[in-house]
């Protein structure tokens, strides 16, 4: 029944802050109100229902079985540290053989160190799993191809690719050098293309495969000082959508994840004011291991019909994003001139324009 207790609670969780904001509640109280109202719906009995953060343990146990990766081979780029490391470890725990790729460069893309990737492989093997190291740079076409070839050479196939490798060169736009631009684009966008292209024919020939690409709200929404990174991350969304469309008939799927997690790539966030210090402390609670379960689920057969989607993960909260759609259209017989656009169209459409925003503006509340 639509008005049943579980259904009312489920609607509140799905609507989240948007529903509550309509009641003019302060943003800082949104999550508290969600918890309180869900508690009211669930009651003292602590009822559980599927599709929310209050799933039963039985359902969670079932998911651990359906999201298994037994017999699958997965390549994870940038897997020596942070999010990539956690994904590689969880893939192995769920039964996959893993190619752990990491150049071992700094957050700015300088230098190399085989140590982090080797450590991840050692951990996987010590736990009884299978893994090999690949130290190539994804920004080099031959290096990117070697990641996939290592999977086939060592394990006989390739079933999943996680494009996670990345660097940062943050600069305000008018001070950004051509090198800063090209280096970031080469690693994030070109690197994702090179590795995906190398895996595509294997996926097509076997009639299955899963791409998991990492995007960012810096691209989906915007951010200061990240023109290179934002452009690359939005480009990855276009790449993923095209792969999803082109390869759906072959049983191949492609999805994006926008992660919110504390890592060395965001450790340079300014902490000059008390508000900035508090924000960083909150972000530190968003650990990289919270991102890995979604990546593993998307690699598994449980997501065999999920493709072309954009997800985000913030601590214990997962969202799915919409894609741009026209929100208002105006027609004029005989067409538009510059003058009629200026005098008629722009004033009429102004109320539909969106304001400049950053990710903090579309996520004004802290995840639980």
Image (tube, grey):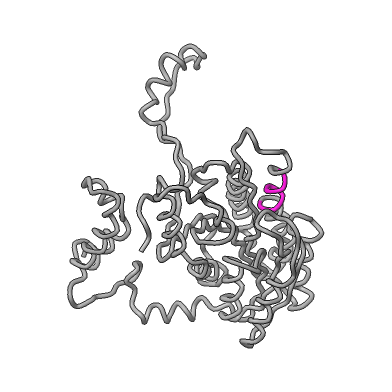
Q: Nearer the viewer, residue 198 or 91?
A: 91
Query: At which x and y percent is residue 337?
Result: 51, 13
Residue 38 vertical position relative to residue 170 in the rendered view, above or below = below
Quadrant in which residue 11 is drawn: bottom left
Side (left or right) of 184 relative to 48: right
Residue at x 61% of width, y 45% of height: 170
What segment carries the magenta color?
182-188
Q: Nearer the viewer, residue 56 or 2?
A: 56
Q: Nearer the viewer, residue 354 or 337?
A: 354
Query: At which x and y percent is residue 316?
Result: 41, 66
- The outermost residue toward the top is 339
Residue at x 43% of width, y 54% of height: 277
Residue at x 41% of width, y 59% of height: 282
Q: Nearer the viewer, residue 57 or 227?
A: 227
Residue 328 vertical position relative to residue 35 in the rendered view, above or below = above
Residue at x 61% of width, y 70% of height: 85
Side (left or right) of 84 relative to 140: left
Quadrant in which residue 214 is drawn: bottom right
**Magenta-highlighted stretch: main secondary structure?**
helix
Query: At which x and y percent is residue 120?
Result: 65, 76
């Amino acid at each position: 029944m639509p008005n049943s207790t579980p259904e009312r609670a489920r609607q509140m969780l799905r609507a989240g802050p948007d529903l509550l904001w309509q009641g003019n509640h302060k943003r800082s109280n949104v999550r508290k109100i969600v918890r309180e109202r869900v508690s009211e719906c669930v009651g003292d009995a602590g009822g559980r229902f599927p599709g929310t953060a209050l799933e039963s343990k039985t359902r969670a146990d079932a998911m651990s079985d359906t999201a298994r990766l037994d017999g699958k081979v997965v390549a994870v780029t940038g897997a020596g540290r942070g999010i990539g490391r956690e994904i590689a470890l969880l893939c192995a725990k769920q039964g996959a053989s893993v190619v752990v790729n990491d150049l071992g460069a700094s957050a700015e893309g300088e230098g190399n160190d085989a140590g982090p990737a080797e450590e991840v492989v050692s951990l996987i093997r010590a736990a009884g799993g299978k893994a090999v190291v690949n130290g190539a740079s994804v920004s080099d076409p031959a290096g990117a191809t070697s990641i996939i070839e290592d999977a086939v050479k060592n394990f006989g196939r390739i079933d999943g690719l996680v494009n996670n490798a990345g660097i940062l060169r943050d600069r305000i736009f008018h001070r950004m050098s051509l090198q800063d631009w090209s280096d970031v684009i080469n690693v994030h966008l070109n690197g994702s293309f090179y590795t995906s292209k190398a895996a595509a024919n294997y996926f097509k020939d076997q009639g299955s495969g899963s791409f998991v690409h990492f995007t960012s709200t810096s691209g989906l929404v915007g951010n200061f000082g990240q023109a290179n990174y934002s452009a690359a991350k939005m480009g990855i969304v276009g790449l993923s959508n095209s792969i999803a469309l082109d390869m759906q008939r072959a049983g191949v799927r492609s999805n994006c994840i926008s992660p919110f997690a504390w890592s060395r790539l965001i450790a340079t966030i300014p902490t000059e004011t008390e508000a900035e210090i508090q924000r960083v402390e909150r972000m530190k609670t968003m650990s990289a291991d919270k991102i890995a379960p979604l990546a593993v689920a998307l690699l598994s057969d449980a997501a065999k019909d999920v493709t072309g989607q954009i997800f985000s993960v913030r601590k214990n909260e997962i969202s799915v994003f919409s894609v741009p759609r026209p929100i208002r259209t105006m027609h004029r017989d005989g067409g538009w001139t510059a003058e009629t656009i200026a005098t008629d169209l722009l004033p009429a459409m102004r109320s539909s324009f969106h304001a400049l925003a950053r990710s903090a503006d579309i996520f004004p509340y802290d995840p639980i």
